[in-house]
Image (spheres, helix red, strand yellow):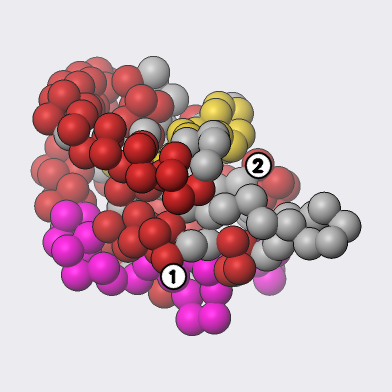
Amino acid sequence: MMYRDFGKRSFDLIVATLSLFLLSPVFIVVGVLVYFKHGRPIIFQQQRPGKQGKPFVMFKFRTMNSARDADGNLLPDAVRLTRFGRFLRASSLDELPELINVLRGEMSLVGPRPLLMHYLVRYTPEQMRRHDVLPGITGWAQVNGRNRLTWEEKFELDVWYVDNYSLALDLKIIARTLLKILQRDGISQPGQATAEEFKGSKV
């Protein structure tokens, strides 16, 4: 219970602070490379639902360029995702700025991934329970298949995490995340730049 009451937040602050300090050279190098390969802004910012669905701005390194069609509309994600962007996603280096979200108390190191705001109205009441905790940089679904899972499978794993998280489980997830990064496993779904859109579950 102590971990659930205040230990998880303390763990997040300690690990996020140390990670930002130790990885600051990587952060700078990646930022410079993003600037030269993708231009400005270096950091991609997007509103995502946090705990209880409360919106916050999530930070990531940009992995796509700003290519547009003749009418000025952005081209599809699969077209704008660059080779360097694929490397950032495969290595999870694009996620580094989310450590800032952790320090700000908007995210946790481990928890259900924050998805898109318009998905909120598409969840079943059970799926909505994934928002009973802070969203995470990594999570139980990410180490059990990531984008190779169906949406329903992901949400089932997310809700299981909400009911069962502990320090031991978080440490296990972090360790398995590092292994997944080295293996570059489950980065995207076949035929998709990342994952197909969630359009709601059939009930």
Reply above or below: 178 against 32.
below
Lower position in the chain sequence, tag 1 or tag 2: 2
Check residue 39 for magenta coloring: no
Residue 117: numbered disc: 2
Q: Residue at x 80, y 55 (%)?
A: 73
Check residue 180 for magenta coloring: yes
User: Residue 96, how many percent across, how many down?
Assistant: 31, 39
User: Residue 132, how many percent across, how many down?
Assistant: 47, 35
Q: Tags 1 and 2 in contact by the CB under 8 Å rule? A: no
Judge left or right: residue 157 versus residue 20.
right
Q: Residue furthest right?
A: 71
Residue in the foreground of this view, choosing between 75 and 14? 75
Q: Would residue 66 be visible to someone looking at this image?
A: yes
At numbered mark 1, what does the secondary structure look like: helix, strand or loop? loop
Judge left or right: residue 11 versus residue 107.
left
Q: Residues within 10 Å of mark 1 (few under 14, many from 20)?
A: some
Reply above or below: 90 against 170.
below
Residue type at numbered disc 2 = Met
Residue 129: numbered disc: none
At numbered mark 2, what does the secondary structure look like: helix, strand or loop? helix
Residue 188: numbered disc: 1
User: Which quadrant of the view contains residue 16?
Assistant: top left
Q: Which residues are magenta?
A: 176-203
Q: Indicate the quadrant containing the C terminus: top left, top right, bottom left or bottom right.
A: bottom right
User: Which quadrant of the view contains residue 77?
Assistant: bottom right
